[in-house]
Structure formats: structure tokens, C-alpha cells
Amino acid sequence: MKRKSVLCIFLFLLTVLFTFELLKNIDKVKPQASKWDSDVLKSLNENHSKLKSSVLLHNSLNMSFDIDIVISSFKKSVEDKLNLEQYNRGYNELYSFFLMLGTVFKFIASDVREKIDILESFQKGKNQEHYTHTEKMIIYEVQINKDDPSIPLLGSRTLLRLHRALKFTYLFLDGLVQLNDDDNLSSMAVTMYNKSLANHHPWLIRNAAKLAMYSLPNKKTLINQIAKDADKELLSQKLREGVAALEEAYNEIEHLYTKNDLHSLP
């Protein structure tokens, strides 16, 4: 018992000594802060303010979805004559977004994943030089099909499926921005689906998709799921930029498919 008491006293004294040394060292450190150049501190604070919003948005999406990648990729694709590498890069990020929305959008996510993989395989294949840009791919595949009708336009057909899904995506995001926090997403999602993908899906898939969409929560709940700590005004701004970038890419590809009469590819 006596040995136990001595041990306790020793530990107590050791703790006091450690605390005293720690406080003494803190006092030594404090004056060092005053040696920082005021311009450097000001610059750090300014940079922190500039980065805070974008970092918050990225972190609030659990590092699973970065809308800035979507915006920049689709913009670069359009600027570079519908560059397919940039298009796929943007779509890869959209795929992450579909996954974040849960099982409701699983029917879109699985199809998108398959189509992205097919396009990327063409870009890495033996004829990859023909799959750098959308129009280049279309011209190449149309010519090959004319020479041998048994050869399908696989790349053009694959892109067409992604193209149709892109319309639903930007319509859905646009609808999301316009809703109030307490508005339910289901009716909006079904409306946007009817304007886009529903026109290309068989009856069974159409009804299954609509039924799934009726389980969607209100806007506030969804935003909390995918961007809990995000600045809501910044998020709305980014979503609008995303809608504009997606819609521009959609319109450019729509024009090419109309020009080449490829909307009905099987």
C-alpha cells in the first residue's frame, strides 16, 4: 500500500513538471510568431479565403464528386471540337454523382459505366487515332459501315446512349437548382425523365425508373446527403455552371448526330 502511494506521488510530480515545461516552451514560441512578415500572413489569409469555398464544396461531397471536374471537362471537350477524352473525363465524374444518389439512379449509373468503358476501349485500341474527337469518330465509322454494312457503328452508337443520358442529367440538375428546400424531387425527376430518357426506354424500364424516382426525398434532404457542409449559394452557382456546360456539349453533339442522321442507331 505504501509503495502504491509513493508511486502515485511520483506520477503526480512528474505530471506537474511536464506541464510546467510545456507552458514554459509555449511562452518561448509566442514571440516567434511576431517575427512573421506581415505581408506573408496577409497573403496566407487571402489565399485561405479564396480557397475556402471550393475546398468546402469538394470536401462536403466526401471527395467522391467534384463538379469542377465536370464543368472544366465538358467545356474543354466543346472547345476542342468535342474531344472524347475530355468528354469521358467529365462523364466519369458524373458517374460518381449517380452513385452518390443511391439505388434510385442505379439503372442510369450501370448503363453509363458500361458505355464509358466501351468508348475508352476504342480510344486505346488499334484504331485509336479515329476516336479522339466525336466528328472524327462518326466520319470514320460511317465510312467503314458503307464499305461493309455488317460492321456496326459501335462507337457512335455508344456515344449516342451517353448523349441521351446527358440530357436527363442537365435537366435534372437544372430542376434541382430551381426547387425550394422543402420541394419533393420525385415529380420533378419524373418530368425530366419523360422529356429525355423515357423516349428511348422500353415500357418495363420506364415504369421501373419512374417507380424508383417516387422514393426520392425533398431537395434539402438530398443536398444534405451529397453536400452536407457546402455553402448552399456556392453549390447552386456550381450546379448552374454545370448545367450550362452539359447543355452546350449536348447541343453540339445533337447537331452532329442530326447532320449525319444517326439518331436512330440501333
Image: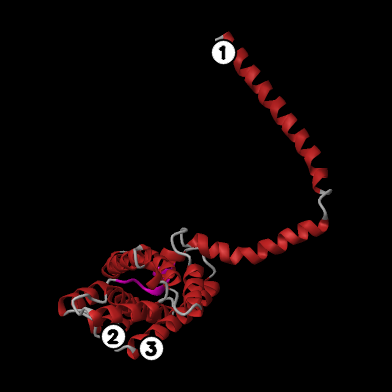
Q: Is residue 131 visible?
A: no
Residue drawn at x 42%, y 66% is 93
Task: Say which label, 2 or 1, has the lower sequence index.
Answer: 1
Q: Is residue 266 visible?
A: yes
Instruction: Please name the amino acid that badge 2 sits on.
Output: Leu
| Quadrant for the N terminus in the image | top right
> Which quarter of the figure has residue 125?
bottom left
Horizontally, is 103 left or right of 130 in the view? left
Q: CA distance from mark 2 to mark 1?
A: 88 Å
Q: Which residue is mark 2?
A: 262
Q: Which residue is mark 3?
A: 255
Q: CA distance from mark 3 to mark 1?
A: 86 Å
Q: Is residue 221 magenta?
A: yes
Please tell me whether residue 237 is drawn above or below residue 128 in the rendered image: below
Q: Are marks 2 and 3 in contact (CB under 8 Å)?
A: no
Dot 1 lies on which element?
helix
> Which quarter of the figure has residue 49?
bottom right
Q: Position of residue 247 (x, y in %)?
A: 43, 83
Between circles 2 and 1, the one closer to the viewer is: 2
Instruction: Please name the amino acid that badge 1 sits on.
Output: Lys
Q: Position of residue 195 (x, y in %)?
A: 30, 86
Q: Which of 57/110 is in front?
A: 110
Report the magenta stretch's main SS. helix
Q: Which of 246/172 is in front?
A: 246
Dot 3 lies on which element?
helix
Q: Which residues are magenta?
A: 216-223
What is the number of the mark on residue 4?
Answer: 1
